[in-house]
Image (cartoon, rainbow, N blue to C red):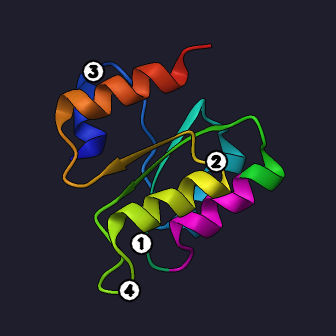
Amino acid sequence: MLRQLLERAGYEVVEAPDGAVGLALYYEHPADLVITDILMPEKEGIETISTLRKTASGVKIIAISGGGGGRLNKEDVLLSAQAFGALRTLAKPVAREELLAAVQETLMP
């Protein structure tokens, strides 16, 4: 859904099923912005954000989460994402306008 929304808004999007694949794709084709979910298989979002901050410190990152699957509430998860380097965080469900505004603001120089 996010990919389609962003493509309709004119953005070029590369999609990955998890953080490990996302990092590999990023290193092959660096992007201006990375949007990551926090809870993913293989490599979770916090680890993905931390790795990007160490290896591609200038990348802009937006983190999205619906919660910790019973372990943590979404506010705590999103605060952790900011602590590790996400510039913006969004709680699921994300409204179309909210996502597009966050992307536009994050990409501004």
User: In the image, which residues are magenta?
Assistant: 42-52
Disc 1 residue type? Leu
Residues at marks 1 and 3, CA–CA distance in whole angstroms: 26 Å
Circle 4 sits on which residue? 71
The answer to whether 4 is drawn above or below residue 49 in the figure is: above
Extreme-bottom residue of the structure: 71
Q: Residue at x 65, y 40 (%)?
A: 29
53 or 91: nearer the eye? Answer: 91
Please name the residue that numbered disc 2 is placed on. 26
Q: Is residue 108 rendered magenta in the image? A: no
Q: Which mark is residue 9?
A: 3
Task: Identify the residue at horizontal 63%, vertical 69% (top origin).
Answer: 47
Comparing labels 3 and 4, the label whose residue is closer to the camera: 4
Going from the N terminus, do you reach mark 2 or mark 1 first? 2
Q: Are marks 4 and 2 in contact (CB under 8 Å)?
A: no
Residue 72 percent coordinates (x, y): 39, 79
Q: How would you rate the neighbour count of disc 3 (Cα within 10 Å): few for under 14, some for 14-19, many for 20 or more?
A: few
* Distance (Cα) linking label 4 and label 2: 29 Å
Residue at disc 1, secondary structure: loop
What is the secondary structure assignment of the residue under circle 4? loop
In this view, the mark in front (4 or 2): 4
Looking at the picture, which amino acid does disc 4 mark? Arg
Is residue 28 shown left or right of residue 106?
Answer: right
Q: Is residue 88 left or right of residue 83?
A: left
Crowding around mark 4 (Cα neighbors within 10 Å: few <14, some 14 to 19, many 20+) is few
Q: Which mark is residue 39?
A: 1
